Image: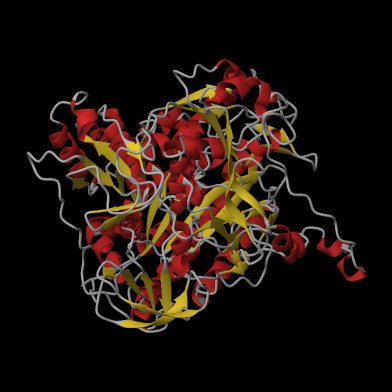
Amino acid sequence: MKDFRILFVFLLLGWSSIKGQVKSPDEFLGYPLGSKFTPYDKVLDYFNYLGKSGKNIKVISYGKSYEGRELLVGIVSAKNNMEKLEQIRQHNKSLSRAEKIQIKGFKPPAIAWLSYNVHGNEASSTEAALRTIYALVEAKTSNIQNWLANTVVIIDPCLNPDGRERYVNYFNSVVGVKPNPNPMAREHIEPWPGGRSNHYYFDLNRDWAWQSQIETQQRLLLYKEWMPEVHVDFHEQNYNEPYYFAPAAEPIHQDITPWQREFQIIVGKNNAKYFDQKGWKYFTKEQFDLLYPSYGDTYPLYNGAIGMTYEQGGIGAGLAVVTLDGDTLTLKDRIDHHFTAAMATLETVSKHSDKLVNEFKGYFETAMVKPPGLFKSYIVKGQNLGKIRRLAELLRRNGVEFAYGGMESGSGYSYETRKTGNFTIDRNDLIINLQQPSAVLANVLFEPQTTVKDSNTYDITAWALPYAFGLNAYASQASIKGKYEALEIPKSMVISGQKPYAWLLPWESVEDAKTLIALQAAGIKVRLAEEGFTVGGKSFPIGSLLIYRTENERLVKELPVKIAEIEKIHKSLFFPVMGGYVDQGKDFGSSAYPVLNVPKIAVVTDPEISAQSMGEVWHFLEQELRCPVMVIGLDDIGALDINKVNTLILPDGNYGDGLGEKLQDWIKIGGKLILLEDAILSAIGRKPFEIQKKEFLKDEISLEEVPKYVSRKRANLSNVIPGAIFKVDLDLSHPISVGLGNNYYTLKTDDRLYEFLKSGWNTGVLKGDSYVAGIAGAGVIKKLDNGMLFGVQPLGKGTIIYFGANALFRSFWENGKLLFANSIFLVN
């Protein structure tokens, strides 16, 4: 009997031990990590399995991707921290608001957020996330247990599941029984559009600040609730490259603090220690800078954290590939490297947790009393309520505080004149006072000219929001605060039961394009004012929309009710007029008010076309405007039916030699062709296109300019333009310029310019003083002078529209969206 009891206790203890363990990824998935790519649904299954294990982990679902895949994070820490997790979160968030709140009874841990697979085809990082979270949940070593006592770790296994599945599905469909390590094998060569981007072909790693994509929007809502002290973004680069980790390369933005720089070095040295033990190659301080504000390292840095990018060689490597060194790089190798870097980093975070929390606290307290930079306030003029609303929404998403109006006047740097000018604050002016927790981020987003010590940058060098939104603004050295929390919105003049002659709507922003789409979808005939006019003492500019009651009553039942409904939904402001006679300008019976066509839009896709450019068009029309758009292949453009497609958009790309023959007849009977960036090159020198590239004679190279071998990896500074802002002079009499302001500011990433159209309209031109901000070499500035950037060429009953610069750049160039919408909806 005694022996039986001993056996029973032994079995019970054994069962408890087994029950306390969780399955490793290998055991759960049924194969060793690194032997194949894990489908995303299995990644979710494993995280949810761990979340239900009773261990010290909490799984939070924070949204879904465009294709409906769940987005989640796993949060792991010591038992004591997990029991106080909500208290820790609230405390950390209070630190980011510079609020003086303390946790009683224990020391607050640092929060480290690890993000994986923001680029879908950098697929080893999600596999590494599985291994990392298992190691933390099991916490078998005293080292890991000690780390978790000082650290709360948040792991997002895949920021871009749609792109990852696109890559994994392709790879699985072409790999053989055994992976082929030969780089020429098709398993290493992805087809268009590749798995890097999300559903709409956006690079999510460049979307943190702009939050144009649903994955980013949902992730940042969760991020702002936790505000980690450390954020690491796990990537892959070309498989011939060794591993990269911090510290970062120059240029490093001047607002990044000495502590943020110092901790990158501390982390880098500890990572290097473990890589040295393994004999693994790595590099630091090269290539990956800290300037552009919308990356997974810079955005956290501008929000008080230590932001870092880690890069493992591996894009296109599949399960195994032979590198230029003759070594075979496997998926297992890549997982090992990412796992080791993550664990070494967590060790460093734990060791310095007190310092991290204290520096994080001080970061925001300093922002409240001594914000960075020369300026203390930014004043954005509120003449255009539609644009101000959109700017305000972007600021809200980023946690930047602002207010409206006031009684003050002052002087400051004018974004329009680029000189000091006087201003008076009006009721709807938007004011950002930098004495706030988000001072650094606000300053980075608004600074007129970013200081760059090293021109060898990884991305664009100018992004000031007043230029991007097309709004007049001032940067002031005075501390100015707004008086009102909300805009003052004029009351609707539409009266129920009233039967006016017409309803009028000035065209000022992208919001008005949404209103027009709703009107036309309701079957309402809308007219365009080709010239400005004055009626009832109010001036209406060119591009205003008109709805005549009598011609629409036969088409739409309860027309006034429908207009009032659309006005409310889209926050528009219609002006009713009681007659067709105008005070100044042409009466409403004139031919100066043509009916606008309902656009039937198609956008072209092909392996020779930029996926990013095509995605920007697709996303803008489908997600922002909610406008019907058809995606067609390049081979199908020669058979367009004008009754089904009257507007064709050619994104940036190569379209071959036969473009004119395929589309000439379609354009002549009323088609509208819009060519974006390099699409123009396929039209140059070919009928019926009249556009010609502006050519420049090459200058002789002086002895001082002869390149040296040591500078082989650096561009010729005279010809550099990684992304700079230029002022475009507009033809304000043309409908394509409606609502843009006196000038349009464009982001240029090349030195291309075009000859003036001889028959047509040069709607946007660059002159000698067009350079505004960002890095642009003297040779580039010289070339971008006295030429056309945007043009409209009539052909028969149709139109050809040329966009020599990207108006939809990463979906944050807001005034460009209006320019693009004008080309679709207002150019008849």
Report the front residue among 277 and 463.
463
- Is residue 18 visible in this depiction of the protein? no
What's the coloring here?
secondary structure
**Residue farthest to the left?**
497
Residue 533 vs residue 204: left or right?
left
Q: Residue at image x 28%, y 77%?
A: 481
Residue 281 vs residue 374: left or right?
right
Place residue 322 in its image quadrant. Answer: top right
User: Could you tell me residue 19's position as x and y percent?
Assistant: 30, 37
Report the front residue among 229 and 799.
799
User: Could you tell me residue 326's position as x and y percent?
Assistant: 80, 39
Up-down: is 65 above or below 451?
above
Q: Residue at image x 59%, y 60%?
A: 726
Residue 664 vs residue 446: left or right?
right
Report the front residue among 607 and 170.
607
Q: Residue at image x 19%, y 46%?
A: 576
User: Could you tell me residue 535's position as x and y percent?
Assistant: 25, 52
User: Could you tell me residue 276's position as x and y percent?
Assistant: 67, 58
- Is residue 688 visible in this depiction of the protein? yes
Quadrant occupied by the N terminus: top left
Up-down: is 136 above or below 627?
below
Badge count: 0
Residue 387 vs residue 274: left or right?
left
Place residue 238 in its image quadrant. Answer: top right
**Residue farthest to the right?**
703
Report the front residue among 274 and 482.
482
